[in-house]
């Protein structure tokens, strides 16, 4: 599948740098203002960087309304019905199918999945969006991901935020590259 990136979004100007970083490193940190296109374009870039990768591209959101809204927007951009290629899940609802490749979810859903999938084997990429919110769920997920990465060299993690102390996250993830959009 071919993905298009809207040229008017600031993230599009940094697409090549993000693609290259995802090919070379397990963890990439992307910082940028609200509205720069991080939430909707990073999943596409993850798919473009590693088209051979099997598994879901998971995107966490701190709130269920954000997960639903971003899933709708991403599905619309891709020209696919919601619940097909792009789906979502939160505590009260799941709109996924066997053809879902992009799963937007609350961070609590991903954390709950670790009880049955502690190595995140269902995922090829996990995008922790709005990481600056630093909820307990996000902190637990980041700690679990750091422990899992050495055992899952095929897993990619993108940490994304509008306001983030990127150097601390970079240090935590072994000097992961930081890309400002």
Image (tube, rainbow, N blue to C red):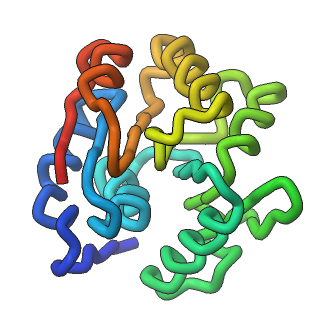
Q: Position of residue 155 (x, y in %)?
A: 47, 31
Residue depicted at 24% across the width and 17% down the height: 175
Q: Position of residue 177 (x, y in %)?
A: 21, 30
Q: Position of residue 86 (x, y in %)?
A: 59, 70
Residue depicted at 21% across the width and 34% down the height: 178
Q: Quadrant of the N terminus?
A: bottom left
Q: Examine the rendered structure and indicate whether residue 60 appears above or below residue 104.
A: above
Number of numbered discs: 0
Which quadrant holds residue 174? top left
Asked if one can make out residue 54 in the rendered structure from this viewpoint, the answer is yes
Residue depicted at 58% across the width and 71% down the height: 71
Q: Examine the rendered structure and indicate whether residue 179 appears above or below residue 67.
A: above
Tell me if 7 is positioned left or right of 39 in this view. Answer: left
Which quadrant holds residue 173? top left
Which quadrant holds residue 167? top left
Q: Position of residue 159 (x, y in %)?
A: 40, 39
Residue depicted at 34% across the width and 59% down the height: 38
- Please tell me which residue lies in front, 33 or 48: 33
Asked if one can make out residue 127 in the rendered structure from this viewpoint, the answer is no
Q: Examine the rendered structure and indicate whether residue 49 appears above or below residue 88.
A: above
- Please tell me which residue lies in front, 147 or 152: 147
Q: Examine the rendered structure and indicate whether residue 170 appears above or below residue 104.
A: above
Tell me if 100 is positioned left or right of 155 in this view. Answer: right
Q: Quadrant of the C terminus?
A: bottom left
Residue extending farthest to the right is 92
């Amino acid at each position: 599948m071919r993905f298009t990136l809207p040229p008017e979004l600031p993230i599009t100007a940094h697409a090549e740098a993000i693609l290259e970083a995802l090919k070379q490193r397990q963890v990439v940190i992307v910082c940028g203002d609200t509205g720069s296109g991080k939430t909707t374009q990073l999943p596409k870039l993850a798919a473009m960087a590693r088209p051979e990768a099997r598994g879901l591209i998971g995107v966490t959101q701190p709130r269920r309304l954000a997960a639903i809204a971003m899933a709708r927007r991403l599905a619309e951009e891709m020209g696919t019905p919601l619940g097909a290629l792009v789906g979502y899940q939160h505590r009260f609802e799941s709109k996924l199918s066997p053809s879902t490749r992009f799963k937007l979810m609350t961070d609590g859903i991903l954390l709950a999945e670790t009880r049955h999938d502690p190595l995140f084997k269902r995922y090829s990429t996990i995008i922790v969006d709005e990481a600056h919110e630093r909820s307990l769920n996000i902190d637990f997920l980041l700690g679990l991901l750091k422990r899992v990465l050495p055992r899952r060299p095929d897993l990619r993690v993108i940490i994304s935020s509008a306001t983030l102390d990127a150097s601390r996250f970079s240090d935590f993830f072994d000097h992961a590259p930081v890309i400002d959009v």
